[in-house]
Image (cartoon, rainbow, N blue to C red):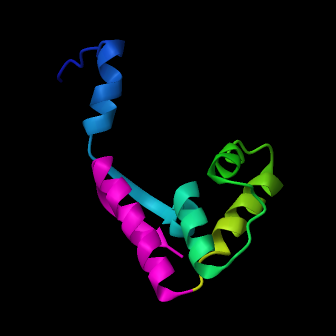
Amino acid sequence: MFKVHAIPSHRLPELLRVMPKAELHIHIEGSLEPELIFALAQRNGVPLPYADVAALRSAYAFTNLQSFLDLYYAGASVLLHEQDFYDMAWAYFEKSQGRSCGAGGAVF
């Protein structure tokens, strides 16, 4: 049997940042960031119920299931064309790579 040594708490953030990860299940449209939601809305002429990116980002502080669903559906409403889905997927892949995510199971 081997002995596990405690990791100093000041080392944990860096350890967790570089540790390999896997996303076992993600609804990829839920990964849309506010900046991309606004860019896609503008490109596709889709009105959003948020004044700007900052207002949309502040809505990410969910208070209940309905507030989450409102945001989720607002984000999904900007996905109209093949290029939108490509841009969404590419943004997700780039972000995953930066988090040391070596595997993913994305669904739509």
Q: Quadrant of the C terminus?
A: bottom right
Percent from the top left, x then y, of residue 74? 71, 67
The residue sitting at the bottom extreme is: 82
Tell me: 64 left or right of 23: right
Quadrant placement of the N terminus: top left
Q: Which image quadrant for residue 105?
A: bottom left
What is the span of residues highlighted in magenta in the rendered image? 81-108
Residue 60, image x, y percentages: 67, 47
Q: Position of residue 85 (x, y in %)?
A: 48, 78
Q: Which residue is located at x 24 percent, y 19 percent?
A: 4
Q: Relative to 50, is 17 above or below?
A: above
Instruction: Identify the main secondary structure in magenta.
Output: helix
Q: Write the residue at 69% across / 43% down.
A: 58
Residue 91 figure quarter: bottom left
- Is residue 10 positioned above or below 94 on the image? above
Instruction: Identify the residue at image location x=29%, y=19%.
Output: 11
Residue 88 belongs to the span the image colors magenta: yes
Along the line of sight, the residue nearer the viewer: 9 or 73? 73
